[in-house]
Amino acid sequence: MTQEQKKLDVLSNEVFVKALVSSGRTCILVSEEDEEAIIVEPSKRGKYCVVFDPLDGSSNIGCGVSIGTIFGIYMIKDAGAARLEDVLQPGKNMLAAGYCMYGSFCMLVLSTGSGVNGFTLDPSLGEFILIHPDIKASHSFNLCIPKKGKIYSVNEGNAKNWDGPTAKYVNYVMSPSRWFVEKCKFPKDGSPAKSLRYIGSMVADVHRTLLYGGVFLYPADKKSPNGKLRYNY
C-alpha cells in the first residue's frame, strides 16, 4: 500500500479479488491495496498472474475527477508451484495491460501486445463496445495520438526527491542544453509555451495524453527507493 486507504479502495479491492479468484484463471494476485501477494488456492488456480490497482486516484473522488483501474497480466511458469518470482518479470513478458476509466463515461483501454483498443461501456446493453480500434491509427474516427502535444504532465512538487539519473533525464529529455520544464514554460524558439496539466489520477492523466498528445511523467523518487507496484503494470 503506497497511500492512505479510502473506504472505496478496500471495497473495490474485495470486488476485484473475488472476481479474479472465482474466474479459475488466476494463480497470483498482487494488488496496490494489499501488503502481500495473494496465492490462489490450488482448486481454483489458473495460469495467470494479475497485478492491479483497483481504484487509482481515489483521493480525487470527492471532487468528481475521473478515476480508474490499472492492470497488467503475466503468465506464470508453473501453476502448481506459484511463486512471487513469477510476478517480477520484465514488461516484455506481459500478455495484456490496460486501464478502465470511470468518469462522465466508462472506458476500457486494452492492449494484448498488438496495438491498443478502446471500448466504451453501453449501459443499455451492459457490455463494452469497441469504439476506438487501433488507437495509434490516424483515421478520423479513431483516437490518434498527436505527434506533438501542447501539454506536459508531472508532479513537480516531487522534483526535490527525484534521484540523480531521473532528474537528469527530466531536465535534459528534450535537449542536452535545456531544462525540460523550462523549455515547456519558456520556449526560446518562438513556439507556444506548453501547459502543465496534472490531475493526480494516472488513468485520467494518461488518457488525456493519448487523446491530446504531450508528455506524461511518473518518475521514481527518494521516498520510494525500491519502486512501486505500478511499475509492474
Image (cartoon, rainbow, N blue to C red):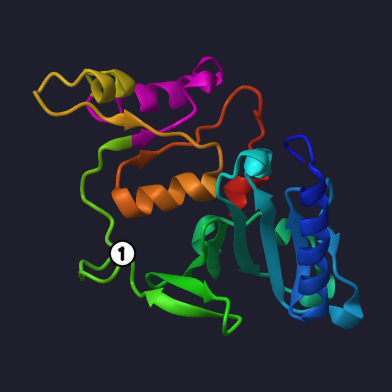
Rendered view: 152 above or below 140: above
Residue positioned most to the top? 160
Q: Quadrant of the C terminus?
A: bottom right
Rendered view: 171 above or below 132: above
Rendered view: 91 above or below 187: below
Rendered view: 174 above or below 114: above
Q: Is residue 174 magenta?
A: yes
Horizontal and vertical percent position of residue 21: 82, 73
| Quadrant in which residue 153 is drawn | top left
Q: Is residue 181 magenta?
A: no
Identify which residue is drawn at 35% across, 34% down: 152
Horizontal and vertical percent position of residue 137: 25, 68
Closer to us: 103 or 216? 103
Identify which residue is drawn at 75% across, 74% down: 26
Horizontal and vertical percent position of residue 230: 61, 47
| Residue 127 can be seen, yes or no | yes
Identify which residue is drawn at 76% across, 65% down: 16
Q: Is residue 11 left or right of residue 115?
A: right
Name the residue beneath numbered marker 1.
143
Q: Is residue 8 left or right of residue 199?
A: right
Identify which residue is drawn at 23% across, 52% down: 146
Identify the magenta region.
152-175
